[in-house]
C-alpha cells in the first residue's frame, strides 16, 4: 500500500530521465534541485497555489463546522413540522453524485458572476450541503443525555445558550472529525476546482500539479513528484495531529 508513496518520494529525488528507467526505490543519485525548480516551474511560485488551497480549505472547514452543527442540533433536539421528511431528504442527498448537480450549480454560479472566484467552493459549505457531517453530528448529539438540556432549561437557558454552552463543547470529537475529513476532501478535490477556476493565479494545489503535465511538450516528472510530496505534507501532519480525535469522533457517533 505504501510502495507508490515511497516510490514517489524517491522519484522526486531523481533526475527526470532516470525516473522510469529505475523502477526501484534505491537511490543511485540525489537530485534535491527538483524541489527548487518545481517551486518556480509554473506561471506563479508554488506557494501561491498552496495559499489558494489553504483559503478554500479554511472557508470550507468554517462553513461545515458552523452550518452542519446548527443543522444537526435542529434535527437532534428540536421538534418541527416535517422533521422526519427533511431528515430523510438530507440522507438521500448523500447518495447523489456531484456530477448530477454540477451543471445546474455551474449555471447558477455563472449567473451570479462567481466563476473564477473561490465563492462556489466555499459558500455552499455555509448552507450545510455536506449531509454526511450533519448525520455524523446528529448521531453524536443523540448520545448526549437530554437531562443536560433539561437542567439548563430549568435555569432559564434557551436553545442558543444550550447549543453554545452545553452541546457544542461536548461535540469536540465530532467537530474534529468534520475538520479532518473536510480538510482532506477539500485539499484533494480536483473536479470542482477544475470546473470553477480557470485563471492560473487562482489555481489550487491539485490544479497546479495537473499543470505540470503538458501534452505538447516533455513533462518534467521529477519536479511534479517533488511538488506532490510538498502537497502531501499538510495532509500527513493534520492526520497525525488529529488522529485521536478522528478515532474518538467516529467511535462515539454510532458509525461502526
Image: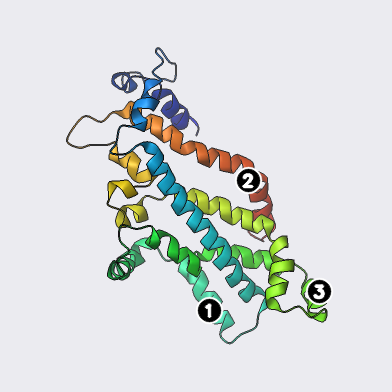
Helix, strand or loop under label 3: helix
Give the labeled residue for mark 3: 147
The alpha-carbon separation of the residues under discs 1 and 3 comes to 26 Å
Q: Is residue 95 visible?
A: no
- Helix, strand or loop at disc 1? helix
Tag 2 near tag 3, CB within 8 Å: no
Mark 2 or mark 1: whose residue is earlier in sequence: 1
Image vertical order of residue 95 relative to residue 52, above or below: below
The residue wearing badge 2 is 242
Residue reaching furthest to the top: 28
- Asked which secondary structure carries label 2, the reply is helix
Identify the residue at image location x=39%, y=27%.
35
Q: Position of residue 174 (x, y in %)?
A: 64, 58
Q: Nearest the camera: 136 or 43?
A: 43
Residue 147 or residue 100, whichever sits in front: 147
Q: Residue 207 location in percent, x, y?
A: 33, 45
Q: Residues within 10 Å of mark 1 (few under 14, many from 20)?
A: few
Of tags 2 and 1, the one toward the viewer is 2
Q: Decide if residue 234 is on the left or right side of residue 108.
A: right
Between the residue at mark 2 and the residue at mark 3, the CA separation in whole angstroms equals 30 Å
Res 170 label:
none
Question: The C terminus is located in which quarter?
Answer: bottom right
Q: Check the image and report above or below for 61 versus 93.
A: above
Asked if 48 appears above or below 132 in the picture, the reply is above
User: Quick check: 80 above or below 57?
Assistant: below
State the residue at coordinates (63%, 53%). Answer: 176
Q: Which residue is mark 1?
A: 86
Amino acid at each position: 500500500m505504501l510502495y507508490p508513496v515511497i516510490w514517489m518520494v524517491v522519484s522526486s529525488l531523481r533526475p527526470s530521465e532516470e525516473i522510469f528507467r529505475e523502477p526501484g526505490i534505491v537511490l543511485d543519485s540525489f537530485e534535491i534541485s527538483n524541489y527548487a525548480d518545481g517551486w518556480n516551474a509554473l506561471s506563479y511560485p508554488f506557494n501561491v497555489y498552496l495559499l489558494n488551497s489553504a483559503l478554500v480549505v479554511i472557508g470550507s472547514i468554517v462553513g461545515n463546522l458552523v452550518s452542519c452543527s446548527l443543522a444537526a442540533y435542529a434535527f437532534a433536539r428540536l421538534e418541527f413540522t416535517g422533521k422526519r421528511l427533511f431528515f430523510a431528504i438530507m440522507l438521500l442527498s448523500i447518495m447523489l453524485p456531484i456530477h448530477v448537480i454540477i451543471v445546474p450549480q455551474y449555471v447558477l454560479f455563472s449567473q451570479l458572476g462567481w466563476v473564477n472566484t473561490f465563492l462556489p467552493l466555499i459558500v455552499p459549505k455555509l448552507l450545510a450541503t455536506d449531509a454526511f457531517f450533519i448525520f455524523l453530528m446528529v448521531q453524536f448529539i443523540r448520545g448526549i443525555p437530554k437531562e443536560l438540556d433539561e437542567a439548563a432549561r430549568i435555569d432559564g437557558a434557551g436553545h442558543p445558550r444550550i447549543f453554545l454552552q452545553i452541546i457544542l463543547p461536548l461535540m469536540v470529537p465530532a467537530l474534529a472529525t468534520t475538520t479532518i475529513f473536510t480538510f482532506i476532501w477539500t485539499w484533494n478535490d480536483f473536479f470542482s476546482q477544475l470546473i470553477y477556476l480557470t485563471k492560473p493565479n487562482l489555481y489550487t494545489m491539485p490544479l497546479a500539479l495537473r499543470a505540470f503535465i503538458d501534452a505538447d511538450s516533455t513533462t518534467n516528472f521529477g519536479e511534479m513528484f517533488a511538488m506532490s510530496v510538498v502537497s502531501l505534507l499538510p495532509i500527513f501532519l493534520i492526520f497525525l495531529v488529529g488522529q485521536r480525535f478522528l478515532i474518538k469522533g467516529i467511535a462515539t457517533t454510532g458509525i461502526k
